[in-house]
Amino acid sequence: MNTSRLSVALAVIGAFVAGICVGSFTGNGSLAPGHGGSAVTSADVRPRGVGSHAASKRAGGSEALLAPEGSEELVGDELVKRVWTTLTIGDENERHAEWLRLLPTLNAQDALAIRDLFRKMDAQGRHFTFEWASFWPRWGEVDGTGALAYLANNESPNWRPEAAEMIVRGWAKADPNAARAWLFANVASPFHDGALSGYIDGLARTDLARATTEALTLGAGKDMSKVMESLTEQALQQRQLGGMMDWWQSLPDDPSEGSARRAAIQAIYSRLQFADVDRAQDWMTQLAATPYRDDDRLGEVAEKIAQKDAGKAVEWIASIPPSPADGHYIAIGRTMRAWGQQDSAAAEAWLNQLPVSPLRDQALIAYTRYLRGAQSPMVDYWLAQVQDQELVQQQQQRASQVMIYTNVVSDATDLLQSVQSTGVIRRRSFDTNGEITVETISPPPARTP
């Protein structure tokens, strides 16, 4: 036999043996609990039908793009063996690609066996975050009722709400009416809130308008932050920045704490600040005089602007109303400090042209804090110009507290260095005249064993 024929023969034999090994392991391996789960039998899950490629495409899932018509469809043991082989692929990108090719073929009857593969891998200390996170929505897509029935008696109780969210996210894409019916029939379920979040998230991917209406109805009286995060993301993905802002405007005008419109502010702002800080600034300016004002976000925008142009940040802060809570101009301290560091002459010129006002007093206090930190001799000069003496007293108390704290830290550092270098402890204290005295304390003799 020549060399080429020998190579082919060895390859065929090797593939045959590998197939036997994989089949033996996946068919007879022990079920070690993983991810807080427990071993179950197929009787624990009641199949509700088999999903198809066409159904996956109608659901709008990414699987439809990765599994064109005519691709190989595996079921039962063949699918389980192929999935196990896929999970053993070392290259992450190659493994993900093969997993996504197989995922649309997973049906209700095979879901539990695939879950058991993860349990076996978990027993070996091997974890697959990407595959794990996409498995549960697929199970929900092909058998939402059965997947949730399994979940009710398996997996860690603390993790069930997260699993329910992923299951119902997939279910809502495939059959939103059935998923909604389950929510109404299982209001007392310990993972109902997680399932609700998944329902809104999954529905929003195919019908944002309906998902928004459902969130307002089903989420009434609940924490809306997570639901609004999902809706905001889909509004941005489907309608871009302008459409996202229009979507927010369409929410019911309710500034009360916990309302959908207020809960969405953080989700929108977190995207605007990275995509377009000027637009974030304009939006925060619009909200500043309304009940939707968010002082934390105002401060973050001001600080972000100050990193490049502190003068512009200060002028913007001065142009919007102060906080209705205490009359404070948000972020005046951070922006004046940044301006002093970038261009103190310009900062002082701006202060000099301001009329006497609460704004000027607050800006002067902020600037003197910067000067004190810079050990400037001009602190008293600028502090004397503050008209509100209560602010001056607060500033002096703050300065005293900072000095005390600094001294304590300095003394502790000196003490530590002294002990480390000499082995002798020197204790500082104040006598009746306020003078510092130093007392040397000899360490106790070492104990003999």
Image: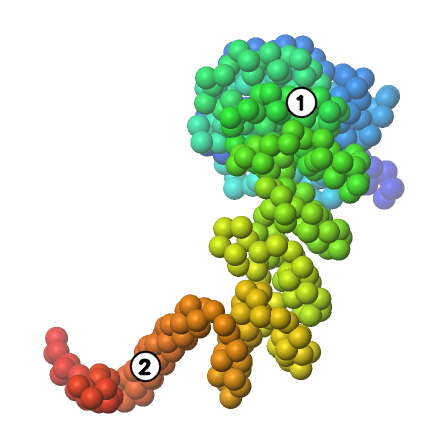
* Left or right side of 316 for 64: right
Q: Residue at x 67, y 13 (%)?
A: 177
- Where's residue 122, x and y in %? 53, 36
Q: Residue at x 63, y 47 (%)?
A: 289
* Left or right side of 415 for 446: left
Q: Which three-letter amino acid code belongs to the residue tagged 1?
A: Thr
Q: Quadrant of the C terminus?
A: bottom left
Indicate which disc residue 420 carries: none
Residue wearing tag 1: 213
232 above or below 324?
A: above
- Where's residue 311, x and y in %? 69, 70
Residue wearing tag 2: 411
Q: Residue at x 22, y 84 (%)?
A: 430
Q: Quadrant of the N terminus?
A: top right
* Left or right side of 396 for 25: right
237 above or below 446?
A: above
- Res. 19 image quadrant: top right
Residue 225 seen from this side:
yes
57 above or below 377?
A: above
Residue 363 seen from this side:
no
Real-space CA distance between mark 2 and mark 1, rounded to the nearest whole angstrom: 62 Å
Q: Nearer the viewer, mark 2 or mark 1?
A: 1
Mark 2, residues whose alpha carbon is within 10 Å: few (<14), some, or many (≥20)?
Answer: some
Q: Which three-letter amino acid code belongs to the residue tagged 2?
A: Asp
